[in-house]
Amino acid sequence: MEILQVVVIGLVLGGVYALMASGLTLVFGVMKIINLAHPIFIIIGAYIAYWLFRLYGLDPILSMPIAMIGLFCLGIAVYKLILEREAGSARYAEMTVLLTFAVAMTFDGLLGFMFTSSQRITSPSYATDAILLGNLFLPKGQFYAGIISVSLIIVLWAFLRYSRLGYAIRATTQNRDAAQLVGVNVALVSTLTFGIGIALAGASGALISFVFSFFPSRHWEWIAMLMSLIVLGGMGKLLGAVVGAFLLAVVAALVSTYIGATWSTLTFFLALFLILLVRPQGLFGEKME
Amino acid sequence: MPSRQDVDGILAERREYDGELANASSSTSQDRAFKTLLVILAILVLFPLVTLSGYNFNYVLHLLLYAFMYIAMASSWNILGGFAGYISIGHNVFFAIGGYFSGMLLAKFGISTLLTAPLAGLLALAVGFAVGFITLRVRGPSFIISSIALLMVTRIVFDNWDFIGGSNGITLPQMELPVRFVKVPFYYGMLTLAVITLVVSYFIRHSKFGLGLRALSQDEIKAECAGINTRLYKIMAFAISGFFVGAAGAMWGEYLTYIRPNIFLVILVAANMVLMCILGGKGTVAGPTVGAILLIAFNEFFVSQFGASQINILGTGVVMLLALMFYPNGVVGTLEKKGKLPRILNWG
């Protein structure tokens, strides 16, 4: 029975990881930006939820929309001020990586300066509670976070599948020039996609604020983890990111139980090197020339 | 009609004249710049003699050797990041490998790291080959991602490996020298390393290998079509740029007298290398040196004014952001474009 317990915990965490990675993969798909600053936005979202809870007692799940709106605006500001000017430059890929790296360091230092680097965690009443399903033991906090993450991803999927803007985003992902030719306002779509991606980071930040403890410089660990799972799934593929997240979360949970908790993060990185060796384009990626 | 003979004669004369002109204008002033650099080097070599005066010059020596170390590391990063255009954000992995390898040799057998530094470099080179073989298989973004992942893997392993002291690290024996001389051996070690790195960087830049790297940084598919073995070139650039960082790490460990993961494996070390190359000018030979001197001076000012390390991260981030947005070519690159590069910085 123990193995089932571990798998269930892994699946719940997988939902959370999937939401953390969804914005990253969306932004890469549309703009080919490797957004190294993505996890620091997650941490900003977590701090918003943390302070709203500490100061006003607002439940982190309720402060999720606030974090989303705030980070949507922040994301658009960062894109407009810093990244958009690189569009069409010869060294686009290299420059955007360096710029997002600089953004990540700036916010890392800023958060560390404002809130110190001590570990934080939001503690609503359900964070320490648990549900018992027969023999299965489900921590309520992780369970809620997982369910909400998965629902948000389904909303995102439906939005991409059925709305006009969703069509435009998918068209731009497939072929930027062709999308422009058929009348998609690619510049606007890029800006909005970046905003949406960062808003998703904010949402997952509010959710993880009661699942993981966080501190400003933890984002370096997360960027490597999230990147590993989107490379595993195939870069820019939403489905790939979700499958990668569930797969790795379950394996990491198994490793953590049977081998040791220190080594569970290592699962993500070993999976990255393995997939680069065997199938560099990822599970769902098309073969590169 | 001039005869064939005449034409040849005229051409030969013309060539000779052109040659003279070229010699007169560029080479003498170039020689002068080269001589100036040699004089600066000679001053740096003789500088530690001031310790014989009986006073303590440790702060100046520390700053200089710290600058030499970062000149070597940034120039080394530049071979991959500047010449080949592959950004590595986990380059301090080599720093840690070098530091731990030589540090362990010192702790177990008492061999000075100044002697084992080249071996540490070779180990870093070998690791670079092995890792590059996996992560440089494909073009594009996966390399950057795997460079961060490599840093995380190394950090986890080093934090939990009891033989090398885990996250507490180990303390290394100190050299038995009077306090005012204690930095001098490391001063010469780092100076030698910096000079060697710069010379290697110059020769790579002017070799067929360097030309190949520049070609693949512009357009990898075209470079491959032109017959360049891009994969081998990339892996070689990665490994070579690991070598000098590894050797620097070896000496740095003994200099600090202890080795610990959170000295070698923090992102700030890698960020410093990246930022120095951007500030000075990526892909130029002189750029990383200029950037290293600028950034170290800036950091020293910053720390003396504000202290705290969090502000240091913030400052590094903001400076990098501004430099990238407004001077992406760096000091050397920008001056070169305007044709105003002082000859003393024109290192090819």
Image (cartoon, coloured by chain):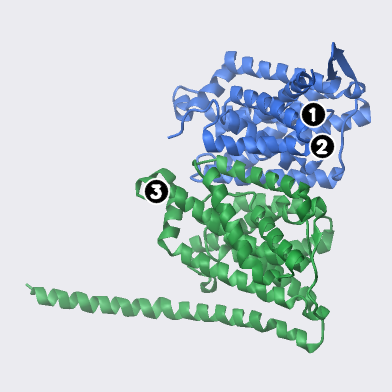
Calculate the distance from the C-alpha at mark 3 to the C-alpha at mark 1: 45 Å
Q: Residue furthest front?
A: B109
Q: Which residue shows up at 61% across the image and 69% down it? A: B194
Query: Which residue is identified by label 1?
Result: A208
Do callouts 2 and 3 point to residues on the same chain?
no
The residue type indicated by label 2 comes to Phe
From the top left corner, tell me how far across and down residue B279 is, in percent. Answer: 62, 58
Q: Nearer the viewer, residue A46 or B90?
A: B90
Query: Which residue is identified by label 2?
Result: A214
Q: Residue furthest top?
A: A134
Crowding at label 1, few (<14), some or many (≥20) Cα neighbours within 10 Å? many
The residue type indicated by label 3 comes to Ala
Q: Secondary structure at mark 3?
A: helix
Crowding at label 3, few (<14), some or many (≥20) Cα neighbours within 10 Å? some
From the top left corner, tell me how far across and down residue B342 is, in percent. Answer: 53, 71
Shade representing chain A: blue
Q: Residue furthest bottom?
A: B53
Calculate the distance from the C-alpha at mark 2 to the C-alpha at mark 3: 45 Å
Q: Which residue shows up at 76% across the image and 65% down it? A: B107
